[in-house]
Amino acid sequence: VQLQASGGGLVQAGGSLRLSCAASGGTFGHYAMAWFRQAPGKEREFVVGISRGGTRKEHAGSVKGRFTISRDNAKNTVYLQMNSLKPEDTAVYYCAADWTVSGAVATTREHYDSWGQGTLVTVSS
């Protein structure tokens, strides 16, 4: 599956952004989806993930209560709504797809088969 992320930009602290990730070339409903991020000089880290059917979600502790992941299987798209943004949320955000038969959501990079190109989110203080 090919992934195309969009929606990044510059926002002030406390603001909101919504990222989108459109999938093509695969059966979207067979994939758990996730967003990872990578800040300058840091490792890529898991942010949020959602199961194939959308019934299960996982969040990194640093974004719980602020970031929400959702998916529209009819549109082959996953979304990341980011509220109450902080300067430490500044990073390149990547969407990723995990072909799976389970309802689980993996939180580590090695489970994810396909990656989007990344979209930059910059939060100013």
Image (tube, rainbow, N blue to C red):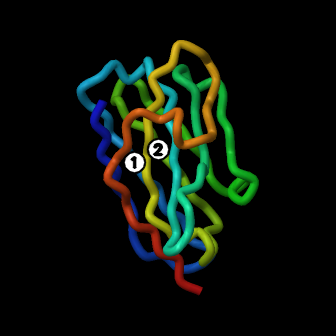
In the rendered view, tell whether residue 12 sits above or below residue 62: below
Q: Quadrant of residue 43?
A: bottom right
In the rendered view, tell whether residue 96 sits above or below residue 7: above
Give residue 20's mark. Answer: 1
Q: Type of residue at label 2?
A: Tyr
Q: Is residue 83 left or right of residue 74?
A: right
Residue tagged 2: 79
Tell me whether the residue at label 1 lies in contact with that at label 2, contact meaning CB atoms closer than 8 angstroms: yes
Secondary structure under the numbered disc 1 in the rendered image: strand
* Nearer to me, 26 or 11: 26
The residue shown at (29%, 46%) is: 4
Q: Is residue 8 left or right of residue 108?
A: left
Mark 1–mark 2 Cα distance, whole angstroms, equals 5 Å
Q: Is residue 40 left or right of residue 119?
A: right
- Which badge, 1 or 2, is on the more N-terminal residue? 1
Q: Are there few (<14), some (14-19), or many (20+) residues within 10 Å of tag 2?
A: many
The residue shown at (37%, 37%) is: 114
The residue shown at (44%, 18%) is: 30
What is the x, y in percent for residue 24?
Answer: 26, 31
The residue shown at (60%, 45%) is: 48
In the rendered view, tell whether residue 29 sits above or below residue 21: above
Quarter of the image containing the C terminus? bottom right
Name of the residue lying farthest toward the bottom: 125
Count of numbered tags = 2
Q: Are there few (<14), some (14-19), or many (20+) residues within 10 Å of tag 1?
A: many
In the rendered view, tell whether residue 61 sits above or below residue 85: above
Name of the residue lying farthest toward the left: 25
Q: Type of residue at label 1?
A: Ser
What is the x, y in percent for residue 22?
Answer: 32, 39
Quarter of the image containing the N terminus? top left
